[in-house]
Image (cartoon, rainbow, N blue to C red):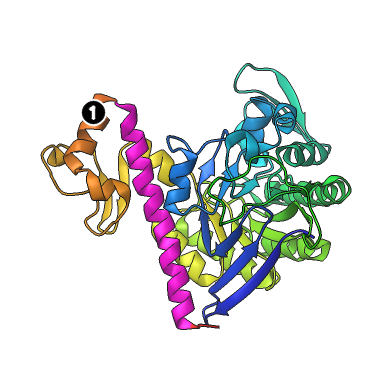
């Protein structure tokens, strides 16, 4: 058995509150997933992520493949055990990172040849190899290898990218079905210490396997997006993602692509929009029926001094906060806003203290996760189910 997904309530606009049962965690949806590129959500320790209510995080296949290597992580018991993260995890396919190496890659029907950004060494990612790496990492959810279309891209380019994505999706799924592994333990909420060694399945305990999501591509062409979604649904993945967004297109176009695709995806399977977005965007998409979202924005912005608050965006580096004793967000109850002032956070930023990135990131993640918690409550109140 792979994942199971239960819809608890729905609204007339399409928003839904659900429960996604994964090997390491039962995830309440809609959910925002912090990005842990190289086995860490930058600047924040795992116990802090747990205290913030993070249910599921991302691992980056490309970066972990290069360093420390997927086989090393497999030998150490998988990524959950390696990074001491007991809750759910999703790994991307590496496709977007390879896509971003535009000057260092060569795309063929077989896959992508690229040079490492670390040392220039040559590597090849095929759909089968991407799946092998993700299986070794041991994430609850893996992603099919895809070809991301840049923006802007003409129709010919988008059609070629779609052709590759569909061929690679089929190969990813076939390889995954043959080689996916069972995940042999899960977190028990009543345990004081989370076991970081495998459990042995006994009577009445059902073994769970990793799951695979297909990714809808097609550039900014509605008909190509629809074509891709319909063909992926025919393949019967465990869930479906909408990729190739937030690559420079106007926000209105992002919303149009999401709106085109959502009605075509199976109601009873999770829907994931990759790489979005600003706080108001994730709230809107959740209320339209998106179950899962991720973005580096809250952590990346934090390291540059940009805080997201209920009163709008706050650039903590500005002189106006030099003696401001107010919390970053007067309406926030996170550990940062309960204890520290804007003046202190500005001082840390200008002093180049490592604590600056940590505190800013904690607040931003708390704000994003808080949005999803509020949306889940609103969806439940609108339609208790």
The quarter of the picture where residue 309 lies is: bottom left
Identify the residue shown where x is 73% and y is 51%.
162
Residue 17 x %, y %: 54, 72
| Vertical arrangement, residue 333 with respect to residue 248, above or below | below
Instruction: Give the quarter of the figure containing the N terminus.
Output: bottom right
Identify the residue shown where x is 52% and y is 71%.
288
Residue 84 x %, y %: 58, 38
Q: Is residue 99 visible?
A: no
* Residue situated in front as seen by the camera: 204 or 164: 204
Q: Main secondary structure of the magenta part?
A: helix
Residue numbers of the magenta segment: 353-382
In the picture, measured across the screen, residue 366 lies left or right of residue 50, that is left
The quarter of the picture where residue 211 lies is: bottom right
Q: For numbered disc 1, what is the local secondary structure?
A: helix
Residue furthest to the left = 323
| Vertical arrangement, residue 34 with respect to residue 42, above or below | below
Residue 52 x %, y %: 42, 51
Q: Which residue is mark 1?
A: 350
* Residue situated in front as seen by the camera: 268 or 197: 197
| Vertical arrangement, residue 217 with respect to residue 302, above or below | below
Tell me, yes or no, whether the highlighted magenta stretch contains residue 248. no
Residue 90 x %, y %: 64, 48
* Residue situated in front as seen by the camera: 192 or 226: 192
Identify the residue shown where x is 28% and y is 59%.
310
Q: Is residue 115 visible?
A: yes
Q: Total label count?
A: 1
Identify the residue shown where x is 52% and y is 60%.
31
Instruction: Give the quarter of the figure containing the C terminus.
Output: bottom right
Q: Residues within 10 Å of mark 1 (few under 14, many from 20)?
A: some
């Amino acid at each position: 058995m792979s994942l199971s997904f239960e819809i608890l309530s729905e609204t007339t606009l399409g928003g839904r509150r659900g429960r996604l049962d994964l090997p390491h965690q039962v995830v309440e949806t809609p959910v925002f997933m912090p990005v842990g590129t190289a086995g860490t959500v930058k600047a924040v320790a795992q116990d802090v992520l747990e205290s913030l209510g993070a249910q599921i995080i991302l691992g980056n296949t490309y970066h972990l493949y290069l360093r420390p290597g997927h086989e090393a992580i497999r030998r150490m018991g998988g990524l959950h055990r390696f990074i001491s993260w007991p809750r759910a995890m999703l790994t991307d396919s590496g496709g977007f990172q390879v896509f971003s190496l535009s000057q260092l890659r060569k795309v063929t029907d077989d896959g992508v040849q690229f040079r490492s950004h670390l040392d220039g060494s040559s590597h090849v990612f095929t759909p089968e190899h991407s799946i092998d790496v993700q299986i070794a990492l041991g994430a609850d959810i893996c992603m099919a290898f895809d070809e991301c279309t840049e923006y802007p891209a003409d129709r010919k380019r988008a059609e070629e990218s779609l052709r590759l994505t569909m061929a690679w999706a089929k190969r990813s799924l076939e390889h995954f079905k043959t080689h996916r592994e069972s995940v042999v333990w899960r977190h028990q909420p009543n345990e004081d210490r989370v076991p970081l060694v495998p459990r042995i399945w006994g009577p009445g305990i059902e073994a769970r396997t990793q799951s695979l999501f297909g990714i809808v591509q097609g550039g900014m062409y509605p008909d190509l997006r629809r074509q891709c979604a319909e063909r992926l649904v025919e393949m019967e993945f465990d869930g479906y993602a909408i990729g190739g967004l937030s690559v420079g297109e106007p926000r209105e176009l992002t919303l149009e692509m999401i709106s085109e695709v959502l009605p075509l995806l199976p109601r009873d399977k999770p829907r994931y929009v990759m790489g979005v977005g600003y706080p108001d965007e994730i709230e809107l998409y959740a209320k339209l029926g998106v179950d899962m979202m991720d973005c580096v924005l809250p952590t990346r912005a934090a390291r540059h001094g940009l805080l997201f608050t209920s009163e709008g965006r706050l650039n903590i580096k500005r002189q106006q906060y030099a003696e401001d004793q107010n919390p970053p967000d007067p309406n926030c109850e996170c550990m940062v806003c309960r204890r520290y002032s804007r003046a202190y956070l500005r001082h840390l930023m200008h002093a180049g203290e490592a604590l600056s990135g940590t505190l800013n990131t904690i607040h931003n993640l708390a704000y994003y996760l808080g949005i999803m918690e509020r949306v889940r409550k609103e969806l439940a109140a609108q339609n208790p189910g």
